[in-house]
Image (cartoon, rainbow, N blue to C red):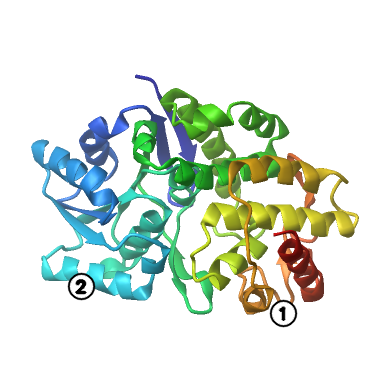
Amino acid sequence: MTTSTVRVRTRDGGYPVLVGVGLTSQLARVLEEHAPARRYAVISDDNVASLHGHPVMERLRDAGLDASLFTFPAGEASKTRESWTILTDEMLEAGFGRDTCVVAVGGGVTTDLAGFVAATYLRGVPVVQVPTSYLAMIDASVGGKTGVDVSAGKNLVGAFHPPKAVVADTELLRTLPRGERAQGLVEAFKHGAILDAEYFGQLEGFTGDLLEADAEAAADAVQRSVELKAAVVSEDEFEGGYRQILNFGHTLGHALEAASDYALGHGSAVALGMVLEAEVGERMGVTEPGTRERLASVLDALVEPVRGLDVERAVPYLRADKKVRAGRSRVVLLRRIGEVDPGDGWSHEVSESALVDALTAGARAS
């Protein structure tokens, strides 16, 4: 079994992202090396708990570690302050102290929510991320962002709280439905679109293997995506500028997601967001002509096209986007596949009317 290690730099020194097949069998050793604690709070949603949460807890107990499992209802609708309250209250009631480490086992919702629990519990305890989906392995578990959704929009309450380690075991992807694998792979294509045209082309070539959860092919893709994201977040840990490029497709994507009350999958929303933001870039003369068409060709084949867009409902969420400055929307625009246009601080000011026009065009095409 080959394990690859990608190092993410932080102001506190950094952490490893371990990528390989069968890595959860080594989790106890990883915890003892990178996050020694008296007690471990394993957090999973109630779907993942039976598949991976309970086995992880039992594996830790078999290794002599004190571990307990805490669960919450599956789905983006549970990534809330209410779920955070319930989890932290349960941990307090169970007597978990400052010598605790949180172990997040699950997809992107779990890594975000459990990470926020760790960031705030007794003013902060360590967290180790054990992602179980492409989305979590490729994106959500890496970079130290944690948080919850609120009525005004997605991920608007949270904290930067880097993990002590990330353990990405691609063998776990086999338990995911094919549709969920496709949703997560959108983020891999995003990494290629913003940073690495060759990687984008490679993903086009072995999408089938990735959708079938071939563990070795998945490990290669996860490793490359983590390398790309690690380089960005190591340079700009707190999203002061360059890290904004990771939000390509997310200005419109997050608005669409929130407007659907999170019935729309994250991958589908971001895929359409990438296509529409490329269209905005082409209209502005920033993005190379044909970029939108290539993105649409690849992403429409990967995830179901979005139907029934509610443009009017999405508009208020554009105003709550984290990149808004002085009340004006800012969008990450490509120069071409594999390269972001630096703009003014790695994003461009775009009028709300231009974004509404893009959403309207997307609604007509759906």
- The mark lying in front, picked from 2 and 1, is 2
Residue at the location (45% across, 40% down)?
178
Q: Assign a secondary structure to mark 2.
A: helix
Q: Quadrant of the N terminus?
A: top left
The amino acid pointed to by label 2 is Asp
Which label number is shown at residue 89?
2
Residue at the location (21% across, 47% down)?
50
Q: Is residue 200 left or right of residue 164?
A: right
Outermost residue toward the top in this view: 1
Q: Position of residue 134 (x, y in %)?
A: 46, 42
Q: Is residue 234 visible?
A: yes
Outermost residue toward the right in this view: 285
Earlier in the chain: of badge 2 and badge 1, it is: 2
Image height of 356 relative to 298, above or below:
below
Which label number is shown at residue 318?
none
Q: Is residue 242 visible?
A: no
Image height of 240 relative to 62, above or below:
below
Residue at the location (58% across, 27% down)?
206
Q: Quadrant of residue 351?
A: bottom right
Q: Quadrant of the C terminus?
A: bottom right
Q: CA distance from mark 2 to mark 1?
A: 38 Å
Residue labelled with disc 1: 326
Which is more toward the observer, 142 or 187? 187
Q: Is residue 285 left or right of residue 161?
A: right
Q: Badge 1, how many Cα within 10 Å: few under 14, some, many 20+?
A: few
Image height of 263 relative to 318, above or below:
above
The amino acid pointed to by label 1 is Ala
Q: Is residue 190 left or right of residue 66?
A: right
Q: Badge 2, how many Cα within 10 Å: few under 14, some, many 20+?
A: few
Which is more toward the observer, 211 or 147? 211
